[in-house]
Amino acid sequence: MVAFSRMIQRPLNQLFVNFRGEEIRHGFLSRLAAALERRGINFFIDRDEQKGKDLKHLFKRIGESHIALAIFSKRYAQSRWCLNELAEMNRLAYNNQLKVVPIFYKVRVDDVRRQKGEFGRNFWKLAMTSSGEEIKNWKEALESVSNKMGLKLCDKRYST
């Protein structure tokens, strides 16, 4: 009920948070969400979303936002959903409809930008089951967003 009532109070989201849940949902992300709530910042995290909705619904949420955070982690590139959201965020940013801020959580910027290291291994494993067009869009988004000024978090205090 709490999530439902909170969604009614904020019809448009100011901030969309794109992340791979397993690594950061209960650590860094829960602290980020609490800080945003304390400051009265409207945001959307998929915990507020009804399960079973399709990607088009998430694209709508991205389009309602003014800013998006792309929180890259080692396992981020295992998720087709994360990468598709990122590609949509990149498209909107290219058209000046969205500001995207990258956050590199325990992952090197260059590994994201060039799909290297553990991040890259996860990316290329998913790419083996993906279309050429998807891969092209994902690579463009990863390179473009990782070239933006962002934050790098690798301090142990942010660990999950």
Image: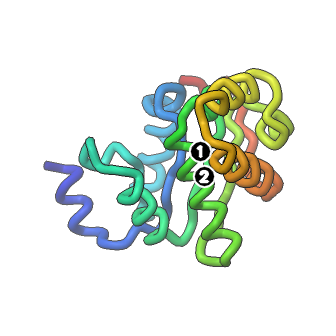
Residue pointed to by mark 2: 86
Q: Residue at x 37, y 72 (%)?
A: 12
How many discs appear? 2
Q: Which mark is residue 109?
A: none
User: What kind of colouring is applied to the model shown?
Assistant: rainbow
Residue 41 location, quadrant: bottom left
Horizontal placement of 65 versus 107: left or right? left
Q: In this view, does 77 lie to the left or right of 44?
A: right
Foreground pick, 74 / 115: 115
- Residue at 45% x, 61% y: name it: 59
Q: Residue at x 70, y 71 (%)?
A: 94
Examine the rendered structure and indicate whether residue 25 appears above or below residue 35.
above
Residue 26 image point, x, y percent: 43, 29
Q: Name the residue under label 1.
A: 83
Callout 1: few (<14), some (14-19), or many (20+) C-alpha neighbours within 10 Å? many
- Between residue 3 and residue 116, name the one nearer to us: 116
Snapshot quadrant of residue 88: bottom right
Query: Which amino acid type is marked by label 2?
Result: Leu
Amino acid type at circle 1 is Leu
Mark 1 and mark 2 residues within 8 Å of each other at the beta carbon: yes
